[in-house]
């Protein structure tokens, strides 16, 4: 497990992983989904910073609470995160 000191270190790590997946493993960038479930605030900020400029697909997993208790036995649900900025029409 990698421990991140700050968001810039996390951003650099995400960039490194992205380059490896695209160049070495030949995975198209459009097929990459970056999940930040359970990350620290700093690591989440780094991932978002690394992904924002290329409009990468971001997601986290939300617990599916269909049962009576605080946690159900249902599988978690992915939640897509869309980043909008001043150049986006949806901003």
Image (cartoon, grey):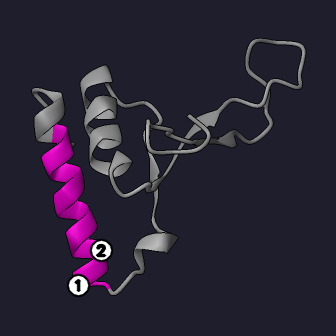
Number of residues whose C-alpha sits closer than 10 Å to that of mark 1, classed few (under 14), some (14–19) or many (20 or more): few
Q: Residues within 10 Å of mark 2 (few under 14, many from 20)?
A: some
In the figure, is residue 80 to the left or right of 88? right
Q: From this viewpoint, is residue 3 visible?
A: no
Magenta span covers which residues?
Answer: 10-25
Label 1: which residue?
A: 24
The residue lying at 27 percent from left, 48 percent from top is 50
Say which residue appears at 19% left-offset and 40% top-offset.
Answer: 10
Q: Is residue 74 left or right of residue 28?
A: right
Percent position of residue 80, x then y:
62, 44
Does the stretch in magenta take in 59?
A: no
Residue 39 lies, with reference to residue 70, above or below; the image says: below
Q: Is residue 74 rendered to the left or right of residue 12?
A: right
The quarter in which the C terminus is drawn is top right
Residue 15 part of the magenta-drawn span: yes
Dot 1 and dot 2 residues touching (CB under 8 Å): yes
Callout 2: helix, strand or loop? helix
Q: Is residue 18 above or below residue 23?
A: above
Magenta span dominant secondary structure: helix
Name the residue beneath numbered marker 2: 21
Residue at 36% over, 58% down: 54
Q: Nearer the viewer, residue 68 or 18?
A: 18
Which of the 4 image quarters holds residue 60?
top right
Disc 1 versus disc 2: distance between alpha carbons? 6 Å
Asked whether the viewer can see residue 31, the reply is: yes
């Amino acid at each position: 497990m990698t421990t991140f000191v700050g968001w810039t270190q996390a951003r650099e790590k995400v960039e490194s992983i992205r380059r490896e997946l695209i160049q070495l493993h030949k995975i198209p960038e459009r097929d990459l989904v970056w999940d930040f479930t359970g990350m620290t605030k700093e690591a989440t900020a780094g991932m978002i910073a690394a992904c924002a400029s290329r409009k990468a697909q971001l997601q986290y997993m939300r617990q599916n609470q269909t049962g009576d208790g605080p946690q159900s036995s249902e599988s978690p649900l992915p939640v897509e995160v869309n980043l909008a900025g001043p150049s986006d029409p949806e901003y």
